[in-house]
Amino acid sequence: MRRRVPLAPISTARQLPRPAELRELVRFRRPRLRPTERRLNAALTVRDLRRAATRTTPRAVFDYVDGAAEEEITAARNVAAYRRVTFCPDALSSVADPDPGVDLLGRRIALPLVLAPTGYTRMMHHHGEAAVARVAGHVGIPYTLSTVGSTSIPDVRAAAPGADLWFQLFLTADPRVNEELLAQAEDAGYSTLLLTVDTAVSGMRLRDVVNGLTIPPTLTARTVVDMARFPGWLLAKLTTPGITFAVLGSAVQGNPTPGEVASLMFDPGMDLTALDWVRRRWRGPLLVKGVTTPDSARRIMARGADGVVVSNHGGRQLDRSAATLDVLPAIRQAVGADATVLIDGGILHGQDIVAARALGADAAMIGRAYLYGLMAGGQDGVLRACEILAEEYQRCMQLLGVRRSADLGRQHVAFRPHGGGDHPGVPA
Ligand SMILES: Cc1cc2nc3c(=O)[nH]c(=O)nc-3n(C[C@H](O)[C@H](O)[C@H](O)COP(=O)(O)O)c2cc1C
């Protein structure tokens, strides 16, 4: 090698710092005084909201939301499946003026997202179902009220007059109750019915048993002491109307006890003929929630449903069932392009919604993701969760080179559905 002449040191022009320039460089954030606002602004992801929820909500309540059935294998699989997705972006494709909206069951919604039914929501935060419905209306996505909701069908409608409200039905063992619930939902202008079919019997959620948060409750001393450690939550509980099964309560005589609710809700004798009754009775769109095999999906569509929700109840019922993302492509193929297919379970990031849509879902549903927000900050927390997911969704879509949700397709993801057993790439 030829010897080089040494490189002369670089000369740097120096000056005294000017205050105006310093101000440009360091922009101090305005301090936020309200703790809820501070907490929510500090949360950049839904996982941050989950962490924040552990600081605002008693352990037993948090566990009721966060926990799942038996060894929680399916719940973990749901989340892990989204991490096996690889995105394949279209290079040099204009994504100016992005449009994340989609058409779903004859309506335009702001992004392919629906808030899933979750029972007893006022236990998580006293704002409860009313707040979740209001946020859904504000954001422009549907909200599904549960049969075991703690705010009645008309009260949720009154709280969110303009929202697209859906109703989730646990077909109870009492036909008069079923009829009354559907009549109320119809009268209050709920657009869509979701019939949940994965609850022949109650799943075994061990965290709830340990905490005594069962139906009926058998609270342990530890759980009661734990609740006292969260004075904000406790004060709200003590100073707002008691939590009841308000949806069912308005359809049965008197206020049902938790034991009565359990015996009404779980009907081991339910079969496809139940779906026939619901299909005849409900004039609007009908989706069947809790489907994880192509055969079941085909049978359900043949009975006149408008679509299915690929769901394992967030891993809260049959543990060791498949991750929903793994079975989505086969179910879409089985029911064809015209059926409505939603998916839920494990969705905690906007990129998960992109993946679900690319793999065949019309939209995704979230349960825990908005409940973490609710626990962390009531109505504002639910809004924060939706904002985070919407931003992540749009950013991912644009970086994929996709301008409209409608253009997302199978070519945008590399994903090999896994049979449902353990996968070597999935961390334990
Ligand atoms: C606390 C909680 C309560 C739920 N209650 C109901 C319910 O009443 N009816 C129902 O069909 N599904 C219920 N689910 C299941 C959700 O609708 C949804 O399927 C599930 O949460 C999706 O998984 P993810 O939480 O991982 O998003 C509940 C889920 C949670 C977490």
Image (tube, rainbow, N blue to C red):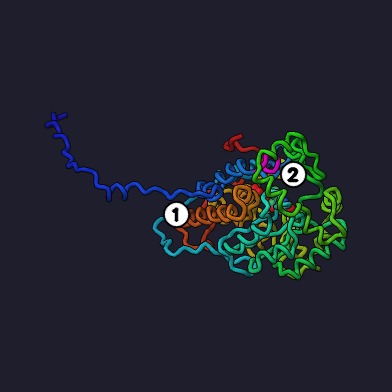
Dot 1 or dot 2, earlier in sequence? 2
Among the 4 quarters of the image, the one containing residue 75: top right
Where's residue 346, x and y in %? 62, 47
Residue nearest the observer in this picture, 249 or 98: 249
Residue type of the residue flagged with mark 1: Leu
Q: CA distance from mark 1 to mark 2?
A: 37 Å
Label 2, secondary structure: give it: loop
Where's residue 162, x and y in %? 63, 69
In percent of the image, x 54 and y 64: which residue is there? 101
- Residue matched to label 2: 318
Residue nearest the observer in this picture, 126 or 94: 126
Among the 4 quarters of the image, the one containing residue 107: bottom right
SS assignment for the magenta stretch, majority: helix
- Residue matched to label 1: 399
Tell me where the magenta segment starts and ends, as one range.
57-62
Query: Up-down: is 20 above or below 177?
Result: above
Tell me if label 1 and label 2 are in contact, CB under 8 Å.
Answer: no
Residue type of the residue flagged with mark 2: Leu
Residue nearest the observer in this picture, 381 or 299: 381
In percent of the image, x 58 and y 42: which residue is there? 51
In percent of the image, x 70 and y 67: which residue is there? 191
